[in-house]
Image (tube, rainbow, N blue to C red):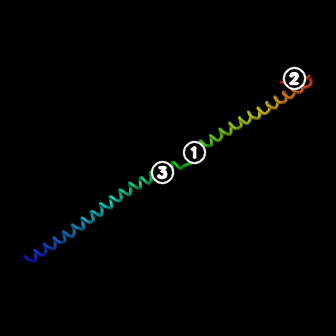
Amino acid sequence: MYDTARKVEECETKVIKIATEIKTAEKTGRDATITAIEDRSSFGRRMADQQHLNKILNIKPQITPLTTTKLTLEKLMKVRQQKVDKYKLTNADIQKSLTEIDNQLDKCGCARI
């Protein structure tokens, strides 16, 4: 009987020890799963943030409208430069006409106002 009681106690001790090991292993597994889920979640957030920054910092979409704006402004500058050149010619013609009128007034002796 003593021998059987001792064997039962040894079995119970082994069961308790194995149950403790199982609990420890389950806890470690749960902790690892939670950590993996948190890491995946934070990794997903980091990836989304990185993609957002890449989209913001990408200059290719900005280059096309800026190039178009530059070309439009260059065309406008050429048109305005042509107008300025035309005005200069017109002013020169008007100045020439005024000089001729002044000369004719001087020849005839007419009074200037």
Amino acid type at circle 1 is Gln
From the top left corner, tell me how far across and down residue 57 is, in percent: 53, 50
The residue under the point 68% across, 40% down is: 74
Which disc is residue 86 wearing?
A: none
Instruction: Say which label, 3 or 1, has the lower sequence index.
Output: 3
The residue under the point 73% across, 36% down is: 81
Instruction: Name the residue nearer the viewer: 47 or 85.
Output: 85
Q: What is the C-alpha distance between the residues marked 1 and 2?
A: 66 Å
From the top left corner, tell me how far across and down residue 58 is, in percent: 54, 49
Amino acid type at circle 2 is Ala
Which disc is residue 51 wearing?
A: 3
Where is mark 1, residue-wise?
62
Q: Nearer the viewer, mark 1 or mark 2?
A: 2
Where is mark 2, residue-wise?
111
Q: Are marks 3 and 1 in contact (CB under 8 Å)?
A: no
- Quarter placement of the C terminus: top right
Q: Can you name the residue that lies furthest to the bottom here?
A: 3
From the top left corner, tell me how far across and down residue 32 is, in percent: 33, 61
Bin the neighbour count of mark 2 within 10 Å (Cα to Cα): few under 14, some 14-19, many 20 and up.
few
Q: In the image, is 81 to the left or to the right of 60?
A: right
The residue under the point 42% across, 52% down is: 45
Q: What is the C-alpha distance between the residues marked 3 and 1?
A: 17 Å
Q: In the image, is 79 to the left or to the right of 18?
A: right
Q: What is the C-alpha distance between the residues marked 2 and 3?
A: 82 Å
The residue under the point 77% across, 35% down is: 85
